[in-house]
Image (cartoon, rainbow, N blue to C red):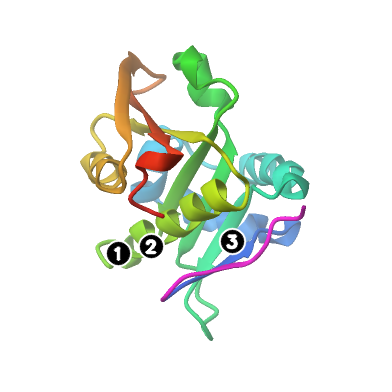
């Protein structure tokens, strides 16, 4: 199975390609985005390529990273990934083997519901098409917007652990408990 293009009411989620590294690096380098996503560390092109290559390695399994666009528009709104929770599992071992959604939007597209819409579409895809019984998520404790989004969609808190920069709150979402589907 290859990673498909996904469509929601207002968005197109296009599978990322290797040539998207520069666009992703530009998004991820923005202070508002990298603050929690990359623990406020600079995002070099080499780091962006490494993260993207990890996502591309998953594409043949049907998951990875998607770029978020509006129909008939070329402006990149952000990205959403569905990736193995390898980093999260280093801090919370019960997450090992699960897939984790990760959302990043350019700040000018915050507060428009795009992150919720993209996340709901990816969760529905993960549960219905990939037949995942459960998914995990992680947010840095100070990132209250992410926490609100995860709770709204039905994720429940598993633990709070010390992360590399901030405390991390970990979550699980069972397929039958998701409000996304």
Distance in Å between CA atoms under marks 3 and 2: 21 Å
Q: Depth-wise, is mark 1 or mark 3 nearer the camera?
A: 1
Q: Report the quarter where the C terminus lies.
A: bottom left
Q: Is residue 17 above or below residue 48?
A: below
Badge 2, how many Cα within 10 Å: few under 14, some, many 20+? some
Residue 168, position as x, y percentages in the image: 34, 24
Question: Label 2 vs label 1: CA separation?
Answer: 6 Å
Decide if residue 18 is on the left or right side of residue 72: right
Q: Please tell me whether mark 2 sits on a helix, a strand or a loop.
A: helix
Q: Main secondary structure of the magenta part?
A: loop
Near-viewer residue (146 or 32): 146
- Mark 2 lies on residue: 117
Is disc 1 in contact with disc 3, using a CB cutoff of under 8 Å? no
Q: Which residues are magenta?
A: 1-9
Q: Is residue 162 above or below residue 62?
A: above
For the point 46% across and 70% down, the residue is 8
| Residue found 65% across the figure and 48% down from its top | 63
Q: Residue at x 67, y 62 (%)?
A: 4
Disc 3 versus disc 2: nearer the observer: 2
Mark 1 lies on a secondary structure that is loop
**Residue annotated with mark 3:** 23
Q: Can residue 167 be seen in this snapshot?
A: no
Q: Are marks 3 and 2 in contact (CB under 8 Å)?
A: no
Q: Which mark is residue 64?
A: none
Total numbered labels? 3
Image-based side of 118 in relation to 83, left or right:
left
Task: Give the quadrant of residue 115.
Answer: bottom left
- Check disc 1 and report the residue beneath it: 113
């Amino acid at each position: 199975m290859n990673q498909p293009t996904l469509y929601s009411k207002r968005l197109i989620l296009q599978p990322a390609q290797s040539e998207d590294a520069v666009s992703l690096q530009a998004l991820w380098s923005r202070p508002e985005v990298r603050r929690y996503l990359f623990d406020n560390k600079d995002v070099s092109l080499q780091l962006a390529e490494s993260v993207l290559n990890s996502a591309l390695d998953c594409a043949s399994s049907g998951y990875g990273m998607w770029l978020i666009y509006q129909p008939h528009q070329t402006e990149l709104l952000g990205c959403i990934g569905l990736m193995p929770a390898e980093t999260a599992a280093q801090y919370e071992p019960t997450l090992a083997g699960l897939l984790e959604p990760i959302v990043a939007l350019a700040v000018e597209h915050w507060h428009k519901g795009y992150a919720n819409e993209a996340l709901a579409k990816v969760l529905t895809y993960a549960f219905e098409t990939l037949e995942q019984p459960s998914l995990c998520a992680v947010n840095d404790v100070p990132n209250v917007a992410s926490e609100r989004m995860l709770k709204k969609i039905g994720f429940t808190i598993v633990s709070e652990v010390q992360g590399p920069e901030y405390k991390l709150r970990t979550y699980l979402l069972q397929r039958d408990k998701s409000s996304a589907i």
